[in-house]
Protein backbone atom coordinates (compact mmCIF):
# COMPACT_ATOMS: atom_id res chain seq x y z
CA UNK A 1 0.00 0.00 0.00
CA UNK A 2 2.90 2.34 0.73
CA UNK A 3 4.25 1.65 -2.77
CA UNK A 4 0.88 2.70 -4.21
CA UNK A 5 0.88 5.90 -2.16
CA UNK A 6 4.31 6.80 -3.47
CA UNK A 7 3.15 6.33 -7.10
CA UNK A 8 0.26 8.68 -6.26
CA UNK A 9 2.79 11.17 -4.89
CA UNK A 10 4.59 11.29 -8.25
CA UNK A 11 1.32 12.03 -10.04
CA UNK A 12 0.33 14.67 -7.48
CA UNK A 13 3.08 16.96 -8.79
CA UNK A 14 0.86 17.59 -11.85
CA UNK A 15 -1.69 19.03 -9.43
CA UNK A 16 0.99 21.24 -7.84
CA UNK A 17 1.80 22.65 -11.28
CA UNK A 18 -1.90 23.29 -11.98
CA UNK A 19 -2.34 25.06 -8.62
CA UNK A 20 0.66 27.29 -9.35
CA UNK A 21 -0.87 28.29 -12.70
CA UNK A 22 -4.15 29.21 -11.00
CA UNK A 23 -2.59 31.19 -8.15
CA UNK A 24 -0.62 33.51 -10.43
CA UNK A 25 -2.60 36.44 -11.86
CA UNK A 26 -0.76 37.23 -15.09
CA UNK A 27 -1.97 34.34 -17.25
CA UNK A 28 -0.37 35.57 -20.48
CA UNK A 29 3.12 35.70 -18.99
CA UNK A 30 2.56 32.41 -17.18
CA UNK A 31 1.44 30.80 -20.44
CA UNK A 32 4.56 32.02 -22.24
CA UNK A 33 6.77 30.85 -19.38
CA UNK A 34 5.10 27.42 -19.14
CA UNK A 35 5.36 26.86 -22.92
CA UNK A 36 9.15 27.25 -22.78
CA UNK A 37 9.38 25.28 -19.55
CA UNK A 38 7.24 22.40 -20.85
CA UNK A 39 9.11 22.15 -24.16
CA UNK A 40 12.45 21.86 -22.38
CA UNK A 41 11.10 19.42 -19.81
CA UNK A 42 9.62 17.13 -22.46
CA UNK A 43 12.95 17.04 -24.29
CA UNK A 44 14.61 16.23 -20.96
CA UNK A 45 12.20 13.34 -20.46
CA UNK A 46 13.19 11.95 -23.88
CA UNK A 47 16.97 12.27 -23.64
CA UNK A 48 17.59 11.69 -19.92
CA UNK A 49 14.77 9.30 -19.06
CA UNK A 50 13.10 7.44 -21.92
CA UNK A 51 16.10 6.75 -24.18
CA UNK A 52 18.06 5.35 -21.25
CA UNK A 53 15.17 3.08 -20.25
CA UNK A 54 14.58 1.99 -23.86
CA UNK A 55 18.25 1.05 -24.27
CA UNK A 56 18.00 -1.11 -21.14
CA UNK A 57 14.73 -2.70 -22.28
CA UNK A 58 16.08 -3.64 -25.72
CA UNK A 59 19.50 -4.73 -24.44
CA UNK A 60 20.63 -7.90 -26.23
CA UNK A 61 17.67 -7.86 -28.63
CA UNK A 62 18.85 -7.94 -32.26
CA UNK A 63 15.78 -6.15 -33.61
CA UNK A 64 15.76 -3.62 -30.77
CA UNK A 65 16.76 -0.68 -32.98
CA UNK A 66 14.16 -1.68 -35.58
CA UNK A 67 11.40 -1.87 -32.96
CA UNK A 68 12.50 1.48 -31.52
CA UNK A 69 12.26 3.23 -34.91
CA UNK A 70 8.95 1.58 -35.84
CA UNK A 71 7.20 2.56 -32.59
CA UNK A 72 8.68 6.07 -32.55
CA UNK A 73 7.34 6.65 -36.08
CA UNK A 74 3.99 5.07 -35.14
CA UNK A 75 3.66 7.32 -32.06
CA UNK A 76 4.59 10.39 -34.11
CA UNK A 77 2.10 9.57 -36.89
CA UNK A 78 -0.64 8.65 -34.42
CA UNK A 79 -0.51 12.07 -32.76
CA UNK A 80 -0.15 13.78 -36.16
CA UNK A 81 -3.34 12.14 -37.45
CA UNK A 82 -5.20 12.81 -34.20
CA UNK A 83 -4.03 16.43 -34.29
CA UNK A 84 -5.56 16.91 -37.73
CA UNK A 85 -8.85 15.41 -36.53
CA UNK A 86 -9.22 17.80 -33.58
CA UNK A 87 -10.96 21.08 -34.58
CA UNK A 88 -10.35 24.64 -33.35
CA UNK A 89 -6.59 24.52 -33.67
CA UNK A 90 -4.77 27.70 -34.65
CA UNK A 91 -1.36 28.96 -33.57
CA UNK A 92 -2.08 32.43 -34.93
CA UNK A 93 -4.32 33.57 -32.08
CA UNK A 94 -4.44 37.23 -31.05
CA UNK A 95 -5.09 39.30 -27.95
CA UNK A 96 -8.22 41.00 -29.29
CA UNK A 97 -11.39 40.19 -27.36
CA UNK A 98 -13.10 38.61 -30.39
CA UNK A 99 -10.30 36.03 -30.53
CA UNK A 100 -10.48 34.94 -26.87
CA UNK A 101 -12.55 31.87 -27.76
CA UNK A 102 -10.03 30.91 -30.46
CA UNK A 103 -7.16 31.34 -27.98
CA UNK A 104 -8.92 29.22 -25.34
CA UNK A 105 -9.61 26.47 -27.88
CA UNK A 106 -5.92 26.48 -28.79
CA UNK A 107 -4.88 26.16 -25.13
CA UNK A 108 -7.24 23.22 -24.64
CA UNK A 109 -5.97 21.62 -27.85
CA UNK A 110 -2.34 21.66 -26.66
CA UNK A 111 -3.39 20.49 -23.18
CA UNK A 112 -5.37 17.56 -24.60
CA UNK A 113 -2.51 16.39 -26.82
CA UNK A 114 -0.02 16.79 -23.96
CA UNK A 115 -2.14 14.67 -21.64
CA UNK A 116 -2.60 12.02 -24.32
CA UNK A 117 1.13 11.87 -24.98
CA UNK A 118 1.96 11.61 -21.28
CA UNK A 119 -0.55 8.93 -20.22
CA UNK A 120 1.40 5.94 -21.57
CA UNK A 121 4.61 7.38 -20.18
CA UNK A 122 3.06 7.90 -16.74
CA UNK A 123 1.57 4.40 -16.56
CA UNK A 124 4.98 2.88 -17.32
CA UNK A 125 6.61 5.16 -14.73
CA UNK A 126 3.96 4.14 -12.19
CA UNK A 127 4.79 0.46 -12.76
CA UNK A 128 8.50 1.16 -12.36
CA UNK A 129 8.08 3.27 -9.20
CA UNK A 130 5.88 0.61 -7.61
CA UNK A 131 8.40 -2.17 -8.31
CA UNK A 132 11.35 -0.09 -7.07
CA UNK A 133 9.47 1.01 -3.92
CA UNK A 134 8.49 -2.58 -3.18
CA UNK A 135 12.22 -3.40 -3.00
CA UNK A 136 13.38 -0.18 -1.31
CA UNK A 137 11.09 2.53 0.08
CA UNK A 138 13.84 5.16 0.03
CA UNK A 139 14.81 4.41 -3.59
CA UNK A 140 11.16 4.49 -4.64
CA UNK A 141 10.58 7.80 -2.86
CA UNK A 142 13.62 9.39 -4.53
CA UNK A 143 12.48 8.08 -7.91
CA UNK A 144 8.97 9.49 -7.37
CA UNK A 145 10.51 12.85 -6.41
CA UNK A 146 12.64 12.81 -9.55
CA UNK A 147 9.62 12.00 -11.72
CA UNK A 148 7.57 14.65 -9.92
CA UNK A 149 10.00 17.44 -10.81
CA UNK A 150 9.29 17.12 -14.52
CA UNK A 151 5.56 16.74 -13.84
CA UNK A 152 5.22 20.25 -12.38
CA UNK A 153 5.74 22.25 -15.62
CA UNK A 154 3.41 19.91 -17.53
CA UNK A 155 0.79 20.52 -14.85
CA UNK A 156 1.33 24.27 -15.22
CA UNK A 157 0.87 24.04 -18.98
CA UNK A 158 -2.31 21.93 -18.81
CA UNK A 159 -3.77 23.85 -15.86
CA UNK A 160 -3.43 27.32 -17.41
CA UNK A 161 -7.22 27.36 -17.98
CA UNK A 162 -9.38 26.81 -14.89
CA UNK A 163 -12.29 24.95 -16.53
CA UNK A 164 -14.10 21.65 -15.96
CA UNK A 165 -12.40 20.12 -19.02
CA UNK A 166 -8.98 21.19 -17.76
CA UNK A 167 -9.68 19.77 -14.30
CA UNK A 168 -10.56 16.43 -15.88
CA UNK A 169 -7.28 16.46 -17.84
CA UNK A 170 -5.30 17.21 -14.68
CA UNK A 171 -7.12 14.45 -12.79
CA UNK A 172 -6.27 12.02 -15.62
CA UNK A 173 -2.59 12.98 -15.39
CA UNK A 174 -2.54 12.67 -11.59
CA UNK A 175 -4.15 9.21 -11.65
CA UNK A 176 -2.23 7.80 -14.64
CA UNK A 177 0.96 7.20 -12.63
CA UNK A 178 -1.08 5.65 -9.83
CA UNK A 179 -2.89 3.40 -12.33
CA UNK A 180 0.47 2.01 -13.46
CA UNK A 181 1.31 1.00 -9.90
CA UNK A 182 -2.22 -0.31 -9.35
CA UNK A 183 -1.94 -2.61 -12.37
CA UNK A 184 1.18 -4.23 -10.92
CA UNK A 185 -0.47 -4.46 -7.47
CA UNK A 186 -3.76 -6.01 -8.64
CA UNK A 187 -2.57 -8.36 -11.35
CA UNK A 188 1.02 -8.97 -10.31
CA UNK A 189 1.75 -7.63 -13.78
CA UNK A 190 5.24 -8.16 -15.15
CA UNK A 191 5.77 -6.91 -18.69
CA UNK A 192 8.63 -8.20 -20.79
CA UNK A 193 11.45 -5.71 -21.28
CA UNK A 194 10.82 -5.65 -25.03
CA UNK A 195 7.14 -4.67 -24.52
CA UNK A 196 8.14 -1.90 -22.10
CA UNK A 197 10.68 -0.72 -24.69
CA UNK A 198 8.01 -0.60 -27.40
CA UNK A 199 5.62 1.39 -25.19
CA UNK A 200 8.34 3.85 -24.24
CA UNK A 201 9.36 4.20 -27.91
CA UNK A 202 5.74 5.00 -28.70
CA UNK A 203 5.89 7.72 -26.04
CA UNK A 204 9.07 9.14 -27.58
CA UNK A 205 7.33 9.51 -30.95
CA UNK A 206 4.29 11.22 -29.41
CA UNK A 207 6.45 13.51 -27.27
CA UNK A 208 8.62 14.52 -30.25
CA UNK A 209 5.49 15.49 -32.16
CA UNK A 210 4.31 17.62 -29.24
CA UNK A 211 7.62 19.45 -28.93
CA UNK A 212 8.16 20.05 -32.67
CA UNK A 213 4.66 20.83 -33.91
CA UNK A 214 3.05 22.33 -30.81
CA UNK A 215 5.50 23.81 -28.32
CA UNK A 216 8.26 25.05 -30.67
CA UNK A 217 5.68 26.53 -33.04
CA UNK A 218 4.02 28.26 -30.12
CA UNK A 219 7.34 29.66 -28.87
CA UNK A 220 8.07 31.09 -32.34
CA UNK A 221 4.60 32.69 -32.60
CA UNK A 222 4.49 33.90 -28.98
CA UNK A 223 4.92 37.64 -28.46
CA UNK A 224 6.57 37.26 -25.03
CA UNK A 225 9.73 35.56 -26.29
CA UNK A 226 11.81 36.79 -23.34
CA UNK A 227 9.39 35.08 -20.94
CA UNK A 228 9.49 31.92 -23.09
CA UNK A 229 13.28 31.83 -22.93
CA UNK A 230 13.15 32.28 -19.14
CA UNK A 231 10.91 29.21 -19.07
CA UNK A 232 13.40 27.31 -21.23
CA UNK A 233 16.26 28.29 -18.90
CA UNK A 234 14.31 27.22 -15.82
CA UNK A 235 13.46 23.95 -17.58
CA UNK A 236 17.16 23.30 -18.12
CA UNK A 237 17.75 23.86 -14.40
CA UNK A 238 14.99 21.36 -13.55
CA UNK A 239 16.49 18.81 -15.94
CA UNK A 240 19.90 19.17 -14.30
CA UNK A 241 18.36 18.69 -10.84
CA UNK A 242 16.41 15.69 -12.13
CA UNK A 243 19.58 14.10 -13.54
CA UNK A 244 21.51 14.74 -10.31
CA UNK A 245 18.75 13.21 -8.16
CA UNK A 246 18.35 10.28 -10.58
Image (spheres, grey):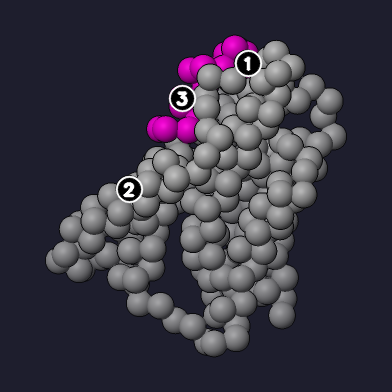
Q: Secondary structure at mark 3?
A: helix
x 52%, y 39%: residue:
87
What is the C-alpha distance between the residues marked 2 and 3?
A: 18 Å
Q: Nearer the viewer, residue 245 or 81?
A: 81
Question: Mark 1 or mark 2, which is nearer the start of the sequence?
Answer: 2
Residue position marked by numbered label 1 in the rendering: 94
Q: Is residue 176 magenta?
A: no
Q: Quadrant of the N terminus?
A: bottom right
x 42%, y 41%: residue:
84
Residue position marked by numbered label 3 in the rendering: 217
Residue position marked by numbered label 2 in the rendering: 77
Q: Which mark, by number, is residue 214?
A: none
Residue 22 visible in image: yes
Q: Position of residue 246 (x, y in %)?
A: 53, 52
Q: Quadrant of residue 241?
A: top right
Q: Nearer the viewer, residue 236 or 187?
A: 187
Q: Is residue 224 magenta?
A: yes
| In the image: residue 149, left or right of residue 246 | right
What is the C-alpha distance between the residues marked 2 and 1?
A: 29 Å
Q: Quadrant of residue 10?
A: bottom right
| Main secondary structure type of the part rendered in magenta | helix
Q: Secondary structure at mark 1?
A: loop
Amino acid sequence: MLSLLITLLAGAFFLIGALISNLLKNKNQLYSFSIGLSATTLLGIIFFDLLKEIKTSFYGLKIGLFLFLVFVIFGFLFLFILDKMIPNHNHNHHDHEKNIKEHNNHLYHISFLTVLGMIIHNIIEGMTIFIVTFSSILSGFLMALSVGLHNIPIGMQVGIRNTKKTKMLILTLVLSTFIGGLLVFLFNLVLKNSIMGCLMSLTVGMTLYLVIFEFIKEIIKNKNKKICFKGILFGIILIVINVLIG
